[in-house]
Image: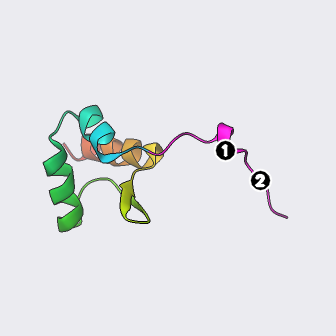
Amino acid sequence: MTVKISPSARRALGKPLEVADYLGIPEATLKQWRWLGKGPKFVPVGRHVRYRWSDVETWLDEQAGAA
């Protein structure tokens, strides 16, 4: 059985600039982290990069626990 979720019920994906602003870092740092395989998980959407906010929050919680 497949459960369908309406698009309005989903949280919008974050753009790199939005995520960088949320984390308080330069967008270039986020780009470098992607290249190095660090930082929050990202989702390629065609030629674009997007972030699930749940992945950003999970990554942030992991960073707080590592400190």
The relative height of residue 50 versus residue 64 in the rendered view (above or below) is below
The residue identified by callout 1 is: 7
Query: Which residue appears farthest toward the front when viewing the image?
Result: 47
**Numbered-mark total:** 2
Asked if residue 12 is among those painted magenta in the image, a careful observer would answer: yes
Residue at the location (45% across, 49% down)?
A: 52
Q: Residues within 10 Å of mark 2 (few under 14, many from 20)?
A: few
The residue identified by callout 2 is: 4
In screen coordinates, is 2 left or right of 47? right
The relative height of residue 59 versus residue 21 in the rendered view (above or below) is below
**Location of residue 43 in the rendering, given as x and y in whole percent from the top left corner:** 42, 60
Quadrant position of residue 44: bottom left
Q: Residue type at mark 1?
A: Pro
Q: CA distance from mark 1 to mark 2?
A: 9 Å
Residue at the location (19% across, 45% down)?
A: 27
**Location of residue 7 in the rendering, given as x and y in whole percent from the top left corner:** 67, 44
Q: Residue type at mark 2?
A: Lys
Magenta region: 1-13
Determine the secondary structure under disc 1.
helix
Determine the secondary structure under disc 2.
loop
Looking at the rendered image, the disc whose residue lies closer to the viewer, 1 or 2, is: 1
Asked if residue 19 is among those painted magenta in the image, a careful observer would answer: no
